[in-house]
Amino acid sequence: MDCLFANSLRFCFSPGKRLCCCFKDSLENLSDRTESELLKIHFSSILEVIHSKANLTRTDSNSIRSIYNAFFVNPTSCDLTELSTYTSRCKSLIISWVSPTDAAVSYTWFDLPKNWNPENEYPLYVYLHGLWDVADDKLRYLANPYSSSADSTANVVAFEDGYHIAPWGRGNLWYQGISETDIFECIARIESLFKVNQKRKYIGGHSMGGFGAWYISSRSVDIWAGVGIHAGALWYGGGYTPNSHFALRNTPVYFVCGDKDGLIVYSEYSYQTLHNIGNKNLKYVTFPGGHDYWQRDVDGFYLWIRNFEKQEDSVMNFYGQNAPTDSVEVFAAGIVSKNSRNEYAPRFSPSGKDFYYTVEEENRSRLISYSSQLDSGVWSPEDTAFFCKTFENSGETYLQNDTVIYFTQITGTPGNLKTDFWKAEKGNSEEWDEPFSLGAPVNDPDRQWLISVSNNNNIVYSGDQDAFVCETNGVNSYLDPFQLQFPTRENDHIYDIYIDPGENYLIYSAETPESQGKDFIYFFQ
């Protein structure tokens, strides 16, 4: 018998810290003898979690005793002291960390992929627990994978091609606040130890965990290749906000729920909403039963979701809009392009992270601009552009870069309208400064309409069915405008014009003698 038993089993099983000390000695002895770095992390993680409890309760002592028994007294067919137990996926490992947010010790259950090779890159599957009394107690959750009633994962199909984590999440905090932080800190810990395929990260969960998967993924959609909602409590915490559905518009989502589960109405609603706004990668599964958790449903989620990879370019994925092809299609149908209004002048910023467009009302006598911003991979729902909140009847924007924007404002009355160009810049605070009018000689009572600006700050605009140029004469100062002349096109009635930022070419739309009342688009170098 090893020296760690010298004081007898009765001594080791005495309450509180003496039991903890005995277990500590045992695991440290194992850690010293093993050549596996993974087992060393596993053993030290268990100890770190136990030591993080300053005052052990009777329940804590019982949890420690159950782990000790599983390791040293009544081992099952899965020997918890051997690496093969974990590489065969018979039992879960424990991985702990100290939170950089609040210095608390947290941890996760961790399963290796089948036929694991530490040199290979694997997918990562995050599966969040539901509202569970075991998770209310830090050491009970720690002990759960090693209880006599815990099932072996050796024959479980789910997640066998990747790393699987089931974070404690600080208990039953609905994965908000520090609980949400805990999930991301867990992922960071795993990625510091193992090679994770960044295109294949998935998140799912049951009940409260289903809400957590929905809530977290909708706030970090650029991370996830797919989401699983297993009887999700989506009613909690504003899960029905337009933001969350729009955010997941292009993310594969798997729903599964019992047909007698009271939560099924929430899964049905979210599934239908995502379908209506264009999500083409959805799966909806029901089974006879109530608020049940079955391994078969986790397996079904896994077998479907593993086929998806994260798309690299979130910028081009504007509300699920497909990349351009030879076929014409309505842009962002039902979100930007709506049957009830006339939209035009769409503008992306050079970085692709801001989008503006103009809506025309009242026979073009009234304009309003809307904008959307890309933040952490999520496009925000349309909102009135910042300048329209102060300058009514404004639109037709031009974003010279990410910090300079121009727009047109209409003033006056029908039959006596006047248009002016305005400019706004972002200051050091990344907020837009107060817009200012370009003034004379750019602003003319009769003719300017749509503005375009080169990198040299030369302005081109359309008006009075012609195109004009105002060359820069210093910062926000310009020479008198002159009319552009296009050889052989002197009879064109020009409406919209765009200058290449490098001043290499012009594009304009015009009604021409040969267009028979329609607008054609022309290109000039």
Image (cartoon, helix red, strand yellow):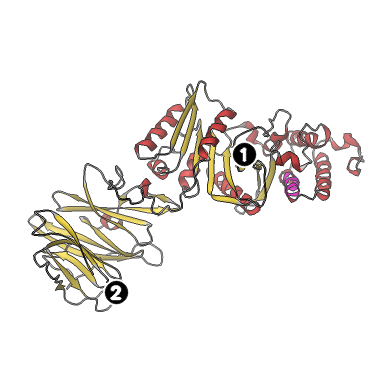
Along the line of sight, which residue is nearer the eye, 6 or 108? 108
Residue 333, above or below 147: below
Left or right of 516 on screen, residue 238: right
Identify which amino acid the numbered label 1 is placed on: Glu
Residue 62 can be seen, yes or no:
yes
Left or right of 361 on screen, residue 229: right
Q: State the mark number for residue 160.
A: 1
Q: Does residue 176 show up magenta in the picture?
A: no
Q: Quadrant of the C terminus?
A: bottom left
The residue stretch that appears in magenta = 38-47
Left or right of 256 on screen, residue 466: left
Along the line of sight, which residue is nearer the eye, 92 or 512? 512
The residue at which mark 2 appears reads as 456
The percent position of residue 458, horizontal first and vertical second, equals 25, 73
Which residue lies most toward the bottom here?
473
**Secondary structure of residue under mark 2:** loop
Residue 104, above or below 420: above
Residue at (59, 48) in percent of width and height: 187
The percent position of residue 40, horizontal first and vertical second, equals 76, 49
**Secondary structure of residue under mark 1:** loop
Residue at (45, 49) in percent of width and height: 311
Mark 1 near mark 2, Cβ–Cβ under 8 Å? Answer: no
Identify which amino acid the numbered label 2 is placed on: Asn
Give the quadrant of residue 206.
top right
User: Is the stretch drawn in magenta largely helix, strand or loop?
Assistant: helix
